Amino acid sequence: MNNELVPQPSWWKRNWKWVVPVGGCFTLIIGAIIVFSSLYFGISNIMEESQPYEYALELLNKDEALLEVLGSPIEKDGMFQGNISWTNGNKIAKIIVPIAGPKGEGKLYIDASGQGEDWIYHEIRVEVKEQEFDFLNESGSEF
């Protein structure tokens, strides 16, 4: 009778058939998460640093009637919707931003266009519950 031990194959030789597909799928999933989160945070950063958003938020935090309803400070409270585009020196911003303060929440609507460094604001409006706050006169505002 032969009492020699049979050598056991290495871990890799025993498990490669499930490690390769699972590892590949896991790598693709992690890669997709990284790409989508980079896009989301990059676009959010562009929107937050845009002049129309900064100007509108400044107006909101100075308005006594709105501060009475939402409280102070008023800040972004979710994902931006809309777009900002630059084409041949012309720029257009149409943005909807969920906002909130200590007392409540609402939506900020911004519609602006311009050339160079100048923006013309067609709409800066906030909807809170059933109230609406309009921050521009009928003709629009240029800054």
Image (cartoon, rainbow, N blue to C red):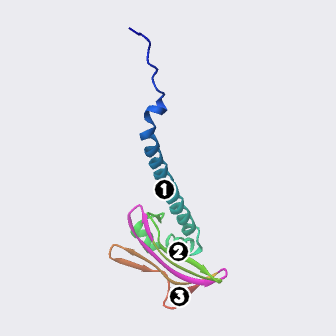
Kind of residue at disc 1: Ala
Cα distance between the residues tagged 3 and 2: 13 Å
> Which label belongs to residue 32?
1
- Report the Cα–Cα distance between label 1 and label 2: 34 Å
Residue closest to the eye, 141 or 21: 21
* Badge 2 amino acid: Ala
User: Which residue position holds label 2?
Assistant: 56
Q: Give the alpha-carbon distance from disc 3 to disc 1, as whole Å.
A: 42 Å
* Mark 3 or 2, nearer chain start: 2
Residue type, mark 3 in image: Gly
Tell me, for residue 140, which label it has, or none. 3
Residue 48, how many percent across, how many down? 55, 67
- Label 1 or label 2, whichever comes before in sequence order: 1
- The mark closer to the camera, 3 or 1, is 1
Contact between marks 1 and 2 (CB within 8 A): the answer is: no
In this picture, is 23 found above or below 141? Answer: above
Magenta span: 97-117
Nearest to viewer (mark 1 / mark 2):
1
Judge whether 9 appears above or below 127 on screen: above
The quarter of the image holding the N terminus is top left
Furthest residue toward left: 130
Which of the pair 20/42 is nearer the observer?
20
Q: Position of residue 103 (x, y in %)?
A: 38, 63
